[in-house]
Image (cartoon, rainbow, N blue to C red):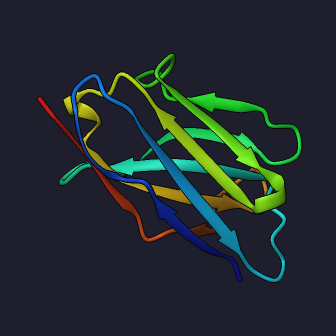
């Protein structure tokens, strides 16, 4: 079992920045990949960014490329999402997720709200 706890969400003005953190714990923590997803009310959850744990290979949704950066601290079992140049449309609940293999995400955090005001 893996537990994921996100933090760092909040209210920010458009053009501002936030840094989300996700701390993972569990007896068998050994992910293939960690990801950040987001979901707005009435919309499907979408993958924002992902990083492979061992090789740190990253991928991003087109909507956030050049603005968001995913990174990880292996020693602290933590994954980050640096979000710059935030837009009103980035307003969502952001979720951290853990994948044991390349095919699916197995564990999810409780989410952290990000609100971008115009």
Q: Is residue 102 left or right of residue 70?
A: right
Q: Give the quadrant of the C terminus.
A: top left
40 to 6, vertically: above or below = above
65 to 76, vertically: above or below = above
Q: Is residue 80 left or right of residue 111?
A: right
Q: Give the quadrant of the N terminus.
A: bottom right
The extreme left residue here reads 118
The extreme right residue here reads 54
> Which quadrant of the view contains residue 115?
top left
Task: Judge by depth and name the residue closer to the eye, 56 or 16.
Answer: 16
Instruction: Estimate the x, y position of residue 10 in percent, counting from the top left.
Output: 29, 52
State how many labels appear. 0
The residue at the point 31 percent across, 28 percent down is 16
> Which quadrant of the view contains residue 51?
top right
The residue at the point 40 percent across, 64 percent down is 111
Instruction: Estimate the x, y position of residue 40 in percent, counting from the top left.
Output: 25, 49
Instruction: Estimate the x, y position of residue 109 in percent, counting from the top left.
Output: 51, 68
The residue at the point 84 percent across, 58 percent down is 75
Q: Is residue 45 left or right of residue 104?
A: left
The extreme top residue here reads 66
71 to 88, vertically: above or below = below
Instruction: Estimate the x, y position of residue 41 in percent, counting from the top left.
Output: 19, 54
Q: Is residue 44 left or right of residue 34?
A: left
74 to 118, vertically: above or below = below
């Amino acid at each position: 079992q893996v537990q994921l706890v996100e933090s760092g969400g909040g209210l920010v003005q458009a053009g501002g920045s936030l840094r989300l953190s996700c701390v993972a714990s569990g007896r068998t923590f050994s992910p293939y990949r960690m990801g950040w997803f987001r979901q707005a009310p009435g919309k499907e959850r979408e993958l924002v960014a992902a990083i492979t744990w061992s090789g740190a290979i990253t991928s991003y949704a087109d909507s956030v490329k050049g603005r968001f950066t995913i990174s990880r601290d292996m020693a602290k079992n933590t994954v980050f999402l640096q979000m710059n140049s935030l837009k009103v449309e980035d307003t969502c609940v952001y979720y951290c997720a853990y994948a044991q293999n390349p095919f699916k995400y197995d564990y999810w955090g409780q989410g952290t709200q990000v609100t971008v005001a115009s």
